[in-house]
Structures are given as structure tokens and as C-alpha cells.
Image (cartoon, rainbow, N blue to C red):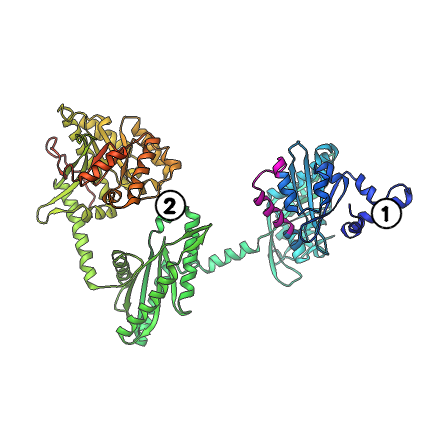
């Protein structure tokens, strides 16, 4: 090892070694270090090996020609990785080494670690930053030191017990209950050891325990030699600040069973206590974002109305909903969703004036109250528009959450108000309607409340009521669209729901299905469709030409989430006497994002009966191959959006070909939807597709009724 470095690296060790060498007259300092059983490696400030002893070569099993040329620590790490001493990617390991080197340099604390070499030798290393720059790394062969391991067991047990208690510091008392030892972060940060050492806990003033009897619980536990947990004490520290501590301890006995005192841990719970006080004080604030919650915002809205009535100036309410937030939550997890909500809340705070109020009503819904805009309504609207556009631009920027660029654009609705003529619910309702108008306009937009929207709301409520009556009165019907094989022969149909309204005529599914989903009517409607489909299958079974056909029924997310879904399907099959092997249930990719394990369990239960499953609109959602292969699927359906431009768009053709290859590897069939031309049909056939559906083979037509329509299930009022 380079002699000039030794005194500056380990002055204490060098001094002892020098004294010993002088007394013995036999060993030089370099020879003494070479005889040490601990390996020493010295790095300069750039990370080059500038010194080592003989044990460094033997313990680390490093070639001397490598060490002698003062290699960069990076080169040593790569050599150890190549030999198998270190596991992992070299660059990642080098990054970690440098991280710990810098950390020890910044904190002054040593970094201790261990690893096992390819030869089976376990080394414990310690990296120490040198005052003048550089580091010394000390390695000990712990595999050969049973005595050292035995000595460490007691320390390990103590560390384990303290770690399990999540201590900020630990302490020891003697037999009389006096502090004899205090160590840890809080002790160092607040220099509290002089305040306690040599004194009993109840002899140091505590704000929350001013009387002797306040310590009775602790004293009784100590007298009985019992452990105690979370004994809370509030004290004034030397820095003048009040801190809360929670003490936990257990009695200590020596090898002969003689009581020697107590040892335990103390935890600084000041933050928790302050948080509890804050919760009590700020009961009107949202816990996730710190914004006003619904109750607080409504109170603030009442005050704004009163202020507006006095000033005669208009105010505005902005209702904000994040587009596609649910998909982000499902795809990346609730922790990422929560982090994104906090980020959006902070952006809203920064985008408005100090006097404006920002609130969170729940989920991904935010509200912003803009006061004192203008006495003229048009001017007030213009200013509200400007602020809302500023909010939209602030929120639409992608946010980096957990290493992902997440974007949830806002749909913003605005309503103006002045005075106290309107109820709070009416103001919120108008802004909410304006927000939905923003979504209907394409999302990521700002829209004002329009009285014409109210008429559409009434129309929607009417449609909901009439749909309920239509279900009751037998106005719903099942249509079917053929599914054909490679020879264009019908092998099944997809059941499609239609509504024959007595006045409106045929109501498009795109108009009434969303209403059914939002109101919960989709559940009884879905059950009706299942029962009717099973009745159709039973009728087909008696017809040799159709006995082998399958009938596909689309499922909604609400249906699949019902606890009794499996039983309801079984009942529909049993009541109709239908063959479950001819029933095919179609799911969408978005449906699979919710509670995957429950979905798989229900699908497997039905698949065991012979029911088939198809994944509809494949390629348009977020299907994960990790769980897709676990699903009991028999069929994938290529979405019509890829089939439409198949002949003109190479990307669509590539996607279709990829889906076919994927399905083949998973042993699934593929149905191409939306086939409208001979050219599409021929190209898909050439790609290997064997099942087709679309206008080229037939438009939806009424399915032959299997008997008079079944009675609709009873509906709740309202």
C-alpha cells in the first residue's frame, strides 16, 4: 500500500502500528498493514485506487496487476461482475457505488454493506469518507470469524427489537430508572442527552404531565417490571420548541436473571400530533389535496353569494372534471392517480388569485370559485373565460408520475351568478351541466352553461322514464347480425338490442344504452337480453340448420360486477333449456380493467359449463398480455376501426395481422368486425382470418322469437 497515504487515511491505526513497529523493531508500517486480516482499499477523490494492502488482494481475490495500475473503481466493479462476485448490471452497480460514495461524503456517516463472492466468501465492507477527499474501504471476512458472529448476535437482537419499534432514538435506564444511555437521530438533532442523563423521566418537566400522578401508569409498569408501550410525553426542548415523544420499553435482566434496568426506544411523534390537531382544526379540507371539501366549498359559495349581493358584481363557478382519469387510475394504480390529483390541485392553486377558492368535490372533480369579476355580465363572463382557459392550459400539461408521463385533460363548465336568488345546488348543477357540455364538445374544452342544456337534461330524464316503461311493456327486441366462416357460411350471430318506441319509432342504441348504463337500468335490461338469447338458442336447437350456431351476447361492466352474475346466467340457461356451449359472452377490453381477479373467477366458473367468451373491440383498449393469457377466452374480435381502412392503411393491415398471429399463439379464434367489401374479406382471408361479421354478409335483422317475449323483471320506482 502506498506509504504516503497511510497517515492521512487512518491516523489512529497508523500511529498504533508505528508504535508497535518501533517496539518490536521487526515490522515496517507497510508490512504491518499487509499482515492485517482486514482488507484496506483507498480511493482518491476521483475514485481511483491509490492504495491497498496485501489482504485486499487475498480477501477480494483481485489480481495485483489490476490494482497496481490505479484503476478507477468502475473498472474494479466490472471485473467483479464478470467473475460473478457481484450480481446485476455493471452500469447499475457502478451507479450505486458512486451514490454511496457521495452519500458518505455528504453525511459523514460510513456506509456498511456485505456481499458474497463467487468463491463463497462473505465480506462485510465499510466505506468511510476522508476529510481531505477520497474514501477508504475496509473489508472483513465474516465467514471465518465465528467468534465475531457470536458477538454480533446480541447487537443484532438489540437492533432488531429497536427496529421493530420504529425508533427515532433508543435509551437505557439503570435499576433506579435513571437514564444511562441515549443515542439516535432525535438525540443528535436536538442535543437532548444532557437534559436526561442521570435523571428519571418523571424528574424532567413535561407539559402534558405536570403532576406526579400523571406518571402513575408508567410508574406502576416499572414497579411490576412490565413492558410499556407508547407512553406519550410533551416536553420543551433546549431549542425552545415543544415536541411530543412516545416512549416504549422493556425490562433488562442479566444472565443470572437479575434486574438491571430498562431499555427501549423513543419516537418523535410531533408531526403526528400536529397533524391530529390540524385535522381537528381543518375538518373542512380534503385530506388528499388540501383543498376545500364539498361542505367547506358550499359554505364559501354561500358567502360569495352574500358578497355578490352587496357589491352587485358577478361571480363564477368553474366545474372541472379530468378526462380519462379513470383509465389512468386503472392502468397505473390508485397511488399514481392520487399523485396526479395532488399535482392537479397544486396547479389549480397556482393558476388562480389568492382570493379565489379551489375545492375538490371528490374523485377527479374540482371546483373553482371566482369572485368580484365585474358588474357587467358580459365583462364578467369574459374574465371567467380567461381564467378557465388558463386553468385548462395548466391542467392539460402531462405530469411525470412514477416515471410515467400521465395526461388527464380537463373538461370545464362555467356558470355565472350574482346575489342570493339561486340555491347552492342550482349553481353547482348548472356548472356540472356545462362541464358535460364541454365533454360532449370533444373534451379538453371550456363551455358556459346554456339554458338549452336544461331542455336536454329534461329530455334525458324523459328518455330514462320511457326506457323503463319500454322494458316493462315489451318494447325491446333482439336483432341479430350473422357471423360467417371462411366459406361465407353462417355459423352464428351476435345479438343486438333494439328499442321499438311506440311514438319515436326505432331509438338508436347509442342514444339509450348510455342512459341505461348511467341509471343502472342496464342490469335488468342485460338480464332480459340473456334470457331472450337463451330462448333463441333453445329454438335453434330444434332446427338442424341452426342447431350448431352460436349466439354472442354483449356484457356490460355493471353486469359482470354483480355478485350473483354467474347464478343469473345459469338460471337463464336452465329456464330456457339452452345448451351453454352455444352461448358466447362478449366483453370489452375496458371491462377487464376492473377487479381482474374477480372477473377471471366468474369467467372460469361459466367456462366450466361450456360457455364461450370473446373479447370485443380488441386493440382499442389497455389489454395486458400478462392477464389476457389467464382469461378463458376462445375468441378475439378485431375492431372495425382496423378493418375499415385495411386496404389503404398499412398500419391497420399490420395491426390486423398482429392480432391474428397473437390469437393463433394463444389458440383463439378471430372474428373480423365491420367487413363491408369483398376486398376486405379477401385480404383478411389471406391473412388467415376464418370468421367474419359485417354488412357485406348481412345487416342486423330481428331474431326469430322463441315464443312470446318473456315478462320484464319488476323495476324499482323512480
Asked if one can make out residue 191 in the rendered structure from this viewpoint, the answer is yes
Question: Where on the picture, by quarter, is residue 368?
Answer: bottom left
Q: Nearer the viewer, residue 647 or 237?
A: 647
Q: Which numbered disc covers residue 637?
A: none
Q: Which numbered disc covers residue 18?
A: 1
Residue 704 in the image: above or below residue 270: above
Q: Residue at x 26, y 29 (%)?
A: 611
Counting the numbered discs, the total is 2
Residue matched to label 2: 330
User: How far from the left and from the top, in percent, is residue 121?
Assistant: 68, 33
Q: Residue at x 18, y 38 (%)?
A: 678
Q: Residue at x 38, y 59 (%)?
A: 395
- Is 237 left or right of 299, judged from the image as shown? right
Q: Nearer the viewer, mark 2 or mark 1?
A: 1
Label 2 Cα crowd, 10 Å radius (few <14 / some 14-19 / many 20+): some
Q: Nearer the viewer, residue 436 or 673?
A: 673
N-terminal label among 2 and 1 = 1
Q: Are marks 2 and 1 in contact (CB under 8 Å)?
A: no
Residue stretch rendered in magenta on the structure:
81-101
Question: Where on the picture, by quarter, is residue 192?
Answer: bottom right
User: How far from the left and from the top, in percent, is residue 526?
Assistant: 22, 39
Residue 630 in the image: above or below residue 522: above
Toward the left, the furthest residue is 503
User: How far from the left and from the top, in percent, is residue 33?
Assistant: 80, 43
Helix, strand or loop at label 2? It is helix
Label 1 Cα crowd, 10 Å radius (few <14 / some 14-19 / many 20+): some
Q: Magenta segment: does it hold 671?
A: no
Distance CA(mark 2)–CA(mark 1)? 67 Å
Amino acid at each position: 500500500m502506498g506509504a504516503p497515504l497511510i497517515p492521512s487515511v487512518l491516523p489512529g491505526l497508523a500511529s498504533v502500528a508505528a508504535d508497535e513497529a518501533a517496539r518490536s523493531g521487526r515490522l515496517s508500517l507497510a508490512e504491518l498493514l499487509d499482515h492485517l486480516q482486514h482488507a484496506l482499499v483507498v480511493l482518491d477523490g476521483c475514485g481511483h485506487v491509490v492504495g491497498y494492502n496485501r489482504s485486499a488482494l487475498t480477501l477480494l481475490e483481485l489480481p495485483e496487476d489490476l490494482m497496481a495500475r490505479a484503476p478507477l473503481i468502475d473498472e474494479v466493479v466490472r471485473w467483479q461482475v464478470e467473475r460473478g462476485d457481484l450480481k446485476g448490471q455493471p452500469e447499475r452497480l457502478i451507479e450505486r457505488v458512486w451514490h454511496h460514495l457521495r452519500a458518505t461524503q455528504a453525511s459523514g456517516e460510513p456506509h456498511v454493506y456485505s456481499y458474497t463472492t463467487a468463491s463463497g466468501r462473505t465480506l462485510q465492507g465499510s466505506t468511510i469518507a476522508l476529510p481531505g477527499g477520497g474514501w477508504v474501504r475496509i473489508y472483513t471476512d465474516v465467514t471465518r470469524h465465528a467468534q465475531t458472529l457470536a458477538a454480533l448476535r446480541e447487537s443484532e437482537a438489540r437492533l432488531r427489537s429497536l427496529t421493530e419499534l420504529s425508533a427515532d432514538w433508543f435509551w437505557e435506564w439503570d435499576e433506579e430508572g435513571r437514564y444511562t444511555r441515549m443515542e439516535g437521530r432525535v438525540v443528535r438533532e436536538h442535543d437532548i442527552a444532557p437534559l436526561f442523563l442521570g435523571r428519571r423521566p418523571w424528574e424532567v418537566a413535561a407539559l402534558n404531565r405536570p403532576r406526579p400522578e400523571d406518571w402513575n401508569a408508567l410508574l406502576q409498569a416499572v414497579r411490576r417490571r412490565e413492558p410499556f408501550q407508547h407512553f406519550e410525553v410533551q416536553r420543551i426542548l433546549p431549542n425552545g420548541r415543544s415536541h411530543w415523544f412516545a416512549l416504549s420499553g422493556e425490562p433488562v435482566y442479566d444472565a443470572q436473571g437479575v434486574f438491571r434496568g430498562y431499555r427501549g426506544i423513543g419516537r418523535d411523534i410531533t408531526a403526528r400530533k400536529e397533524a391530529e390537531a390540524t385535522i381537528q382544526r381543518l375538518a373542512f379540507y380534503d385530506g388528499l389535496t388540501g383543498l376545500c371539501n364539498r361542505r367547506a366549498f358550499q359554505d364559501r359559495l354561500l358567502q360569495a353569494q352574500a358578497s355578490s349581493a352587496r357589491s352587485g358584481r358577478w361571480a363564477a363557478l368553474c366545474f372541472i372534471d379530468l378526462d380519462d382519469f379513470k383509465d389512468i387510475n386503472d392502468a397505473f394504480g390508485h397511488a399514481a392517480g392520487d399523485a396526479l390529483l395532488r399535482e392537479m390541485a397544486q396547479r389549480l392553486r397556482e393558476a388562480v388569485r389568492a382570493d379565489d377558492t379551489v375545492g375538490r368535490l371528490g374523485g377527479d372533480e374540482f371546483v373553482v370559485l371566482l369572485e368580484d369579476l365585474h358588474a357587467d355580465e358580459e365583462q364578467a363572463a369574459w374574465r371567467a373565460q380567461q381564467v378557465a382557459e388558463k386553468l385548462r392550459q395548466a391542467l392539460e400539461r402531462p405530469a411525470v408520475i412514477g416515471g410515467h408521463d400521465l395526461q388527464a385533460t380537463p373538461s370545464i363548465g362555467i356558470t355565472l351568478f350574482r346575489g342570493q336568488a339561486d340555491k347552492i345546488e342550482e349553481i353547482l348543477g348548472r356548472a356540472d351541466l356545462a362541464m358535460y357540455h364541454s365533454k360532449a364538445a370533444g373534451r379538453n374544452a371550456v363551455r358556459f352553461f346554456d339554458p338549452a342544456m336544461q331542455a336536454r337534461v329534461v329530455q334525458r330524464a324523459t328518455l330514462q322514464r320511457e326506457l323503463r316503461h319500454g322494458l316493462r311493456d315489451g318494447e325491446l327486441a333482439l336483432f341479430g347480425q350473422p357471423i360467417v366462416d371462411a366459406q361465407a357460411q353462417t355459423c352464428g350471430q351476435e345479438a343486438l338490442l333494439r328499442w321499438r318506441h311506440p311514438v319515436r319509432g326505432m331509438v338508436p342504441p347509442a342514444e339509450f344504452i348510455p342512459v341505461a348504463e348511467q341509471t343502472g337500468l342496464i342490469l335488468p335490461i342485460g338480464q332480459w337480453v340473456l334470457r331472450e338469447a337463451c330462448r333463441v338458442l333453445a329454438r335453434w336447437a330444434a332446427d338442424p340448420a341452426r342447431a350448431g350456431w352460436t349466439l354472442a351476447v354483449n356484457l356490460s361492466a355493471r353486469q359482470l360486477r354483480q355478485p350473483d352474475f354467474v347464478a343469473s346466467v345459469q338460471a337463464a340457461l336452465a329456464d330456457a333449456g339452452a345448451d351453454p356451449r352455444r352461448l358466447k359472452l362478449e366483453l370489452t377490453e375496458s371491462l377487464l380493467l376492473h377487479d381482474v381477479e374477480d372477473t377471471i373467477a366468474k369467467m372460469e366458473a361459466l367456462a366450466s359449463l361450456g360457455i364461450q367468451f370473446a373479447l370485443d373491440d380488441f386493440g382499442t383498449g389497455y389489454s395486458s398480455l400478462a392477464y389476457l393469457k389467464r382469461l378463458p377466452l376462445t375468441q378475439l374480435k378485431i375492431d372495425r376501426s382496423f378493418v375499415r381502412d385495411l386496404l389503404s392503411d398499412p398500419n391497420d393491415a399490420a395491426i390486423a395481422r398482429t392480432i391474428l398471429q397473437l390469437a393463433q399463439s394463444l389458440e383463439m379464434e378471430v372474428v373480423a368486425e365491420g367487413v363491408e367489401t369483398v376486398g376486405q374479406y379477401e385480404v383478411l382471408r389471406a391473412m388467415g382470418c376464418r370468421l367474419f361479421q359485417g354488412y357485406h354478409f348481412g345487416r342486423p335483422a330481428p331474431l326469430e322469437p322463441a315464443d312470446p317475449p318473456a315478462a320484464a323483471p319488476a323495476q324499482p320506482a323512480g
